[in-house]
Image (cartoon, rainbow, N blue to C red):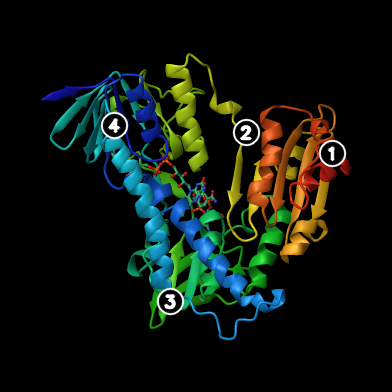
Amino acid sequence: MTRAFDAIIIGAGQAGPSLAGRLAAAGQQVAIVERHLFGGTCVNTGCKPTKTLVASAYAAHLARRGAEYGVMIDAPVRIDMAKVRARADKVIMDSRNGVEGWLRNMTNCTVFDGHARFESANTVRVGDELLTASKIFINVGGRPVIPDFPGVDEVPYLTNSGMLKLDRVPKHLVVVGGSYIGLEFAQMFRRFGAEVTVVEKGLRLVSREDPDISDMIREILESEGIHIRTSAECITFKSHPDGVSVGVDCTEGAPEIVGSDVLLAVGRRPNTDDLGLDTAGVAVDARGYIQVDDGLASSVPGIFAMGDCNGRGAFTHTAYNDFEIIAANLLGGAARKVSDRIPGYALFIDPPLGRVGMTVTQAKATGRKLLIGERPMTHVGRAVEKGEIFGKMQVVVDAETRKILGAAILGTGGDEAIHGILDIMNVDADYTELQWAVPVHPTVSELIPTLLNEMK
Ligand SMILES: Cc1cc2nc3c(=O)[nH]c(=O)nc-3n(C[C@H](O)[C@H](O)[C@H](O)COP(=O)(O)OP(=O)(O)OC[C@H]3O[C@@H](n4cnc5c(N)ncnc54)[C@H](O)[C@@H]3O)c2cc1C
Ligand SMILES: NC(=O)c1ccc[n+]([C@@H]2O[C@H](COP(=O)([O-])OP(=O)(O)OC[C@H]3O[C@@H](n4cnc5c(N)ncnc54)[C@H](O)[C@@H]3O)[C@@H](O)[C@H]2O)c1
């Protein structure tokens, strides 16, 4: 029997549940299909647990530095990894249960547990059930890329999901991939007491950032005793009596590193290969991302894609914004566009990197006349008072239009302070609008007007 709905949502990640809520509240009959864990990656194996662990790691780090603040802890700091993990598990479960309970009790919404697969452009199969609707929203997220490194199938390796199940501290964690996932896990497990080596194939860490920011991130991590190996071109794996031997064909340094555990964090790919998209006629690009227009419509009328699977963002806030765009356009008669989104994100190492818009390198490549402002965190009162002086604030402005093009705040509170700049970019105001602002003292944000006033 085929069951008819107004809308089918595939995936209960960061966009699907909110869209279900809005459509159902508007009186539409909604089916939402989830094959695994409600809340998707962010809730179960991504942002929420990792940021909970980052907080535990920060507590350990600060406890070890206690004496610097005149706080004497008379025994070595010990990590109870089972407790650390239990804390993260509670955050996961509260959030997962919250989303699941909300959906299951939602008026006008039917939850289907199972894997959804298209049988035509308006029909989806879930187990024995056939669902049909004129509007179908795909929110299937992604999973880790596992490259076919020689030997990878012969050794045990971890991904972000496996890392969250550890209730021991690895003796030596080798992290392959020096970007968001790799660096957040590298620093937290170093703080939990592991020896950690990061192996990155690029010339530098987080290579989408400016070289000076990458270098500072490397300095922060190395100052905590994390080994960093860049330019690692030919990675191989072999089993070893002490764990896994990772072949690192670097330009310098030892050719092999022996780790007790290996984390693969070399990017993610969309969960679009088992959806029957070809049956529905939905076009994907060479990497499997669903091709969408500026309103997130796919190549098939009535089918939309939100979140990581459309390749237009790779964050929780971009997935959620995709829901906002679709809801505003379909229910509110708006004409919102993805291309209007100003890119912003944070890298949650400690201190964090908050970033919005263009890097200086990208801004220079546009050929515009630029004004650039910089201030080391050693010249930020709040950072000095907190004893957290790594990093810097940096902003780049178009000298002619006076619009801010981008900014990075690598330093204590950088993940929050960046919003002062993100907000002014969102309202499309000139940077001079901030000159007469009276920020609160002592904060990191209070230096944003100064940074802008001192640009060259
Ligand atoms: C370790 C880690 C840390 C992260 N930290 C951050 C962070 O700090 N900040 C940030 O902004 N982002 C972070 N991210 C990224 C963030 O988690 C993702 O961008 C976000 O979860 C994407 O949401 P989504 O809705 O597109 O997909 P997902 O959250 O992945 O949800 C997709 C859902 O679809 C379901 N599904 C898939 N296929 C089917 C099918 N055929 N049928 C039924 N259901 C299906 C899946 O089971 C899943 O529940 C992190 C990611 C990782 C891995
Ligand atoms: N703070 C956050 O918002 C946050 C945190 C974690 C994850 N995420 C999301 O998760 C996604 C995936 O993160 P990620 O760090 O896995 O991917 P990524 O694409 O950001 O980085 C992958 C890294 O691995 C390196 N790499 C690729 N192939 C390699 C190889 N063969 N050997 C060694 N290094 C190699 C790349 O050069 C790059 O530095 C990101 O797009 C991000 O949006 C976000």
Amino acid beneath label 2:
Ile
334 sits to left or right of 253: left
Whichever of callouts 2 and 3 sits on the residue coming sooner in the sequence is 3
Residue linked to disc 4: 106
284 sits to left or right of 193: left
Question: How far, Cα to Cα, is label 1 from label 4?
Answer: 51 Å
Label 1 element class: strand
Q: Tell me: residue 101, above or below residue 236.
A: above
* Disc 2 and disc 3 in contact, CB within 8 angstroms: no
Nearer the observer: mark 3 or 4; the answer is 4
Residue 342 disc label: 2
Along the line of sight, which residue is nearer the eye, 20 or 198?
20
Q: Residues within 10 Å of mark 4 (few under 14, many from 20)?
A: some
Nearer the observer: mark 1 or 4; the answer is 4
Along the line of sight, which residue is nearer the eye, 203 or 209?
209
Question: How far, Cα to Cα, is label 3 from label 4?
Answer: 46 Å
Q: Tell me: residue 28, above or below residue 431.
A: above
Residue linked to disc 3: 260
Can you name the residue that lies furthest to the left here? 1
